[in-house]
Image (spheres, coloured by chain):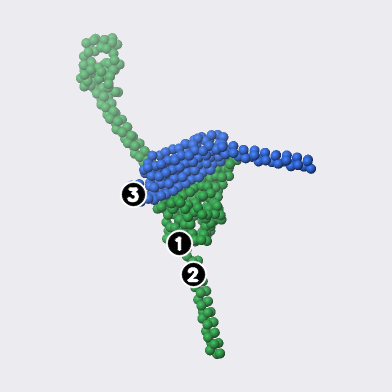
Chain colours: A green, B blue
Amino acid sequence: MQINKRLINFIRLVFLQLIFTIASFNCNSQSASKNEQSIKGKLQLDSVWEPVVYLSHIPTFKDMYTMSNEMIIAESKIDSFGNFHFSSKALPINDNLYRIHVSKKEAPAASLIIGGKEENHIFFIANQNTQIFITNTSSDSLFNKHSINGYLPNYDLKIINDIIYKSEHAKTNYGALKKEFVTKTIHEQLRHIADTSSHPIVSLYALNNSKFESTFLENQKFYENYLIKWEHEDSAYFKELRVKFPKEDNKSIFRFIVIGIFFFLFGFVINYFFGVKRRKSNNLLKSLSIQERKIFSLLKDGKSNKEISDELNIGLSTVKSHASNIYAKLGIKSRKEILDINL
Amino acid sequence: MKKSIKLVTCLFLLLSLTIHAQQNSQHIQQCDAVTLNRNIQLDGSSDTEEIKIEVASNAKKLHIGINSTIKSGYLTVEVYDPKGNKKGNFSIESQVKSSSKKKELVCGQMQKHIDEPIKGDWVIKLIPNNVAGDISICTSMM
């Protein structure tokens, strides 16, 4: 009887120990899964979709709507309850933009559907230490109604997406002028988010959707300040932005200055050269007598010997003699060369 | 009794006529849609192609559906409104060379519904770079 009691006690003890071990194991695994940083989710899909979720890295905003197999960095099967899971350990430390998508059963894995009910992708921001949970609310609309929980910048991203969606879909009944006004207001709203957001990718995402290229001249000061604000950001997203902004080309200004100096010097040299020539002619003219200078000026006016002799009341032979003296002193051979002398 | 039979008959006739008229108007509305389908096959092409869609001033809705599947190359598809504003774009890339025996399909689709579209020529620009694949474009206007 006593042996039986002991045996029962022993079994009780073993049973309790077993329960305790199982409980502690569960607790450990739960806390381990809590600590594990991951991108998880639960999706409701209808039968046209392959139950696989693909994760792609989006290196620049330009690539948001680019699809290739090289962009896909991981895939996760969706279990019968709709759950999927990616470990975020392999992601970069800094925040980056990512896309998850699903493909139709007959379609290749690298399939991108933009617009409509079958839009098959969503974007989100993540890094190595983020824990994100993605869900959709209906299998009909796939990602049209979805939520991304666990990392704050994605809430702001959703706000921006909602603004963009409203701007595209809520103006059916507006006239052209009202449409333009609404679009302008929405772009201003996006620029305000870009200005006030403290997250670089969120801020840049808002700016990219505000059509900033078309309003650069209107808001030049804003963009200059924006670039100063994020001058320490050296991610590919910001490098892409800086290329888009028209910046002052110091090289071309320097080139203009060099060309200017060259022409100034060229003008100076030309002026000097002709100045020397002119000074030379002036010096030669000084070697002429008063009478010869009078005859020289009349010859320069294109007058004939007869006209000069009539005008100066001197004989024709005297004119000829002065003219030959002038030729000799100036080192010229004809009247034509007198006309070419610049004074 | 007779009166009530007459009344019921009149009401039935009126109701059936109304339904018939509604169905007819729906049918007419459906027939008003102008659709255009184009299928383009690219065999290592790098020539940019522009497809124009003329939208009349009375058009209330424009739908553009583009479906492309490529085996090799890089394809960019852009949609522009008559003012030259980009209304959508996507790019797909398959890095397998067209001469390779391997196959790697990449698919890109875009659906655009535009209410009260701007009158004029809407442009779908296809910019292929050594692309082998198929593109189908479906547009409809109402």
Q: Would you identify the image quadrant in which residue A339 lies? A: top left
Question: Which residue is denoted by mark 3 in the rendering?
Answer: B100
Tell me which amino acid carries mark 2: Ser
Q: What chain letter is assigned to the residue under label 2? A: A
Question: Which residue is denoted by mark 1 in the rendering?
Answer: A87
Residue A77 makes an appearance in the image: yes
Q: Position of residue A259 (x, y in %)?
A: 34, 37
Tell me which amino acid carries mark 3: Ser
Question: Which residue is denoted by mark 2 in the rendering?
Answer: A29
Q: Position of residue A272 (x, y in %)?
A: 29, 31
What residue is drawn where x is 31% and y is 33%?
A266
For marks 2 and 1, give the CA distance.
16 Å
Q: What chain letter is assigned to the residue under label 1? A: A
Q: Secondary structure at mark 2?
A: helix
For marks 2 and 3, give the CA distance.
48 Å
Position of the C terminus of chain A by quadrant: top left
Q: N-terminal of the two: label 2 or label 1?
A: 2
- Which of A183 and A269 lies nearest the eye of the viewer? A183
Vertical arrangement, residue A37 with respect to residue B75, above or below: below
Same subunit under labels 2 and 3?
Answer: no
- Which of A94 and A340 lies nearest the eye of the viewer? A94
